[in-house]
């Protein structure tokens, strides 16, 4: 049931769509220690969640804003979702690297190697 839902991804996600996959985040909680942009993602989601009703009110009722303000909040929210997905993928790859090579980055030609995923 999860995979057919991912096939039909809407252009602008609703909060209900996000609640669907947020329920699966505790399954991947072992990756949270490897996440790099957790604070940025959290702040982006909070700002978008708080500002979306404000911009919608200003657009619909007050008439002092236009649809671009509301679109900007959905755009920020979708960027935060993309950052979350890419950060979880990076955390998974980093965890697999540490399992395979240990917690230290191997030395290459006497210099400490740099951890890069390309």
Image (tube, rainbow, N blue to C red):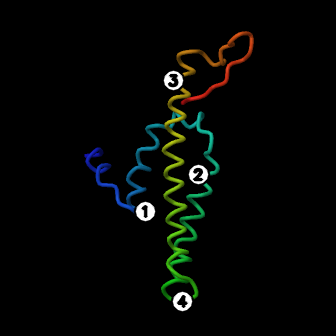
Q: Residues within 10 Å of mark 1 (few under 14, many from 20)?
A: few
Q: Which residue is mark 2?
A: 41
Of tags 1 and 3, the one toward the viewer is 3
10 to the left or right of 74: left
Q: Which residue is mark 1?
A: 15
Image position of 55 with respect to 43: above or below: below
Q: Nearer the viewer, residue 45 or 9?
A: 9
Disc 2 + disc 3, Cβ < 8 Å: no
Q: CA distance from mark 2 to mark 3?
A: 23 Å
Disc 2 + disc 1, Cβ < 8 Å: no
Residue 96 is marked as: 3
Could you tell me residue 92's position as x and y percent?
50, 31
Q: Which residue is mark 4?
A: 63
Q: Residues within 10 Å of mark 4 (few under 14, many from 20)?
A: few
Image position of 94 with respect to 59: above or below: above
Could you tell me residue 33's position as x and y percent?
60, 34
Q: Residues within 10 Å of mark 3 (few under 14, many from 20)?
A: few
Whichever of callouts 1 and 4 sits on the residue coming sooner in the sequence is 1
Whichever of callouts 4 and 3 sits on the residue coming sooner in the sequence is 4
Give the SS element for disc 3.
helix
Quadrant assignment, res 51: bottom right
Quadrant assignment, res 24: top left
The residue sitting at 38% across, 58% down in the picture is: 17
Q: CA distance from mark 2 to mark 4?
A: 30 Å
């Amino acid at each position: 049931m999860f995979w057919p839902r991912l096939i039909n991804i809407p252009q602008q996600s609703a909060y209900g769509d996000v609640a669907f996959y947020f329920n699966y985040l505790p399954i991947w909680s072992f990756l949270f220690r490897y996440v790099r942009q957790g604070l940025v993602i959290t702040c982006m989601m909070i700002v978008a969640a708080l500002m979306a009703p404000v911009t919608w009110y200003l657009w619909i009722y007050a008439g002092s804003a236009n649809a671009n303000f509301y679109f900007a909040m959905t755009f920020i929210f979708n960027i935060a979702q993309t950052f979350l997905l890419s950060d979880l993928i990076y955390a998974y790859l980093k965890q697999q690297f540490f399992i395979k090579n240990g917690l230290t980055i191997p030395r290459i030609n006497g210099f400490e190697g740099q951890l890069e995923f390309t």
